[in-house]
Every structure is written in structure tokens, then in C-alpha cells.
Image (tube, rainbow, N blue to C red):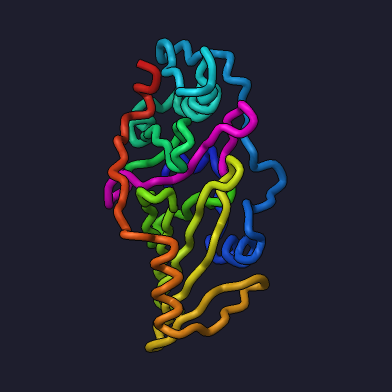
Amino acid sequence: MKHYRRFFALVLVGALLLGCAGCGGGLVGDDPTIRTTGQEPVSSLGEPEVTEGTGNSDPYADIIKSIIKPYEDHPDQLKQQYYALYDIDGDGTKELLLGSEEYSGIVFQAVHAIQNGVAVWQEALPSLVADFPEQRSILKNGIIRVKSVDSDNGSFFRYYRFEDEELKLQIILLDSAFGNEYYRREYGNKDVPVTKEEFDRMRKEMEGDGQVVNLDWKPLAEYGR
């Protein structure tokens, strides 16, 4: 398991699907929100970048510093951590995206966004469990698509979108592994059967033309340089 997950609580994806399927918003944890005043620069990394629309200081500076700190005695492990800045929802302010290097390449792990002037971890998108087969993509229409493959049940499609500066789960769809069966997952982990036409329509509403953003991943150690 990558050391990146020291920073995020490892939560089983199945349990998260059960907890968030019908909430219409972010998951509720003990204290999952990471906040920062954004006033202190990452001195060991030089002057941090200034994010558009957030004033004269970088609101992500303390986030970066807190992630890097556990690697102070293990600098080689920091080389596996990456970041990207991208405006997912098109509001003019870039979100901070974190990723880690896995056998398949750089895997998109987490999102931080500016809410009321502070950087907040978007808890609706759960942290990855090691070796869990999951594909995460940001679409150009502002949707985050997560595809999870379960050999016993089939393929789950989760869709997230920003609403009022907060990332929220929109819908969960299931393409069953037992044949031509399709479902929409609702509150209480209840799978409601839908036709293939309904399934395809709901995917189309979320994905649009399906164009995926190619993120410009950079080494986390170089943030602010």
C-alpha cells in the first residue's frame, strides 16, 4: 500500500457505496475535512503558486506541507506522489488533485477545492483501497466518473459533480455480471432494476460526449517551484 494513504483514511469501497448512495452529497465522517488558512508558504519548496481568485496567498500551501511532512525521513517515497491543478467545474478557480504512482501509472486519488475561501478535502470521493480495480476520470463536462469492477456483481459507475463549491455524488449505476441486467443504486444500498435504454440514457446524461481530461501531473515535491 502506498504511503500516500497515511494522509487519508482507508475506507472499504463497498461500505462507502452503502453509506453515500442516497445522501445526495458528501460522506459524513468523524472529521474528514481538511482546512487551511493558506497564509503559510511551503518554505522547503520555495514560493508556492498563486491560485486564481484566492488572493495573494496560496490556499493549498498548508495542504501540501501536511502531505509532504511524513516523507521527510523517506524522500524516495515522495517521488511516487503527484499533484495537478485543474478547474473541474469551470468557476475560474483550480482544484488541487492528488495522485500516486501505481503499476498502471499515476492514479487520481483525491480532490481539494476552495469553499468559503479555505481549501477543503472533498470527502464525497473516497480514498482508494490498495489494489482495488477502479478507474477514475475527470470528464470535460465537469463530471468525475468512477468505474469499479466487481467480479461477483458487475461494473459500478459512480458520478460526481460540484454543487455550491462541494463535490457531491450524483448517481450510482450497475451493469450486472449476470447477464443483461441493469440497476440504479438508491438509498439503503437498494438496487432498482432499469432497462438498458434507461441505463444508457442516465450514463449519457452524466458523461455527455465522454471526453476525458488529460491531467498535467507534476511531482508533489516540485509544488511551488
Rendering quarter of residue 90 = top left
Residue 3 seen in the current view = no
Rendering quarter of residue 224 = top left
Residue 115 seen in the current view = yes
Magenta segment: does it hold 111?
A: yes
Residue nearest the viewer, comparing 54 with 14 = 54
Residue nearest the viewer, comparing 13 with 88 = 88
Magenta segment: does it hold 196?
A: no
**Whole-percent x and y of residue 9?**
58, 46
Name the residue rendered at 66%, 61% in the picture: 23
Horizontally, residue 136 falls left or right of residue 186, namely left
User: From what the image shows, is residue 174 above or below residue 36?
Assistant: below
**Whole-percent x and y of residue 85?**
39, 32
Horizontally, residue 90 falls left or right of residue 192, namely left
What's the magenta bit mostly, secondary-structure-wise?
strand
Q: What stretch is highlighted in magenta?
A: 102-122
User: From what the image shows, is residue 140 above or below residue 200?
Assistant: above
Name the residue rendered at 47%, 52% in the picture: 128
Name the residue rendered at 57%, 79% in the picture: 191
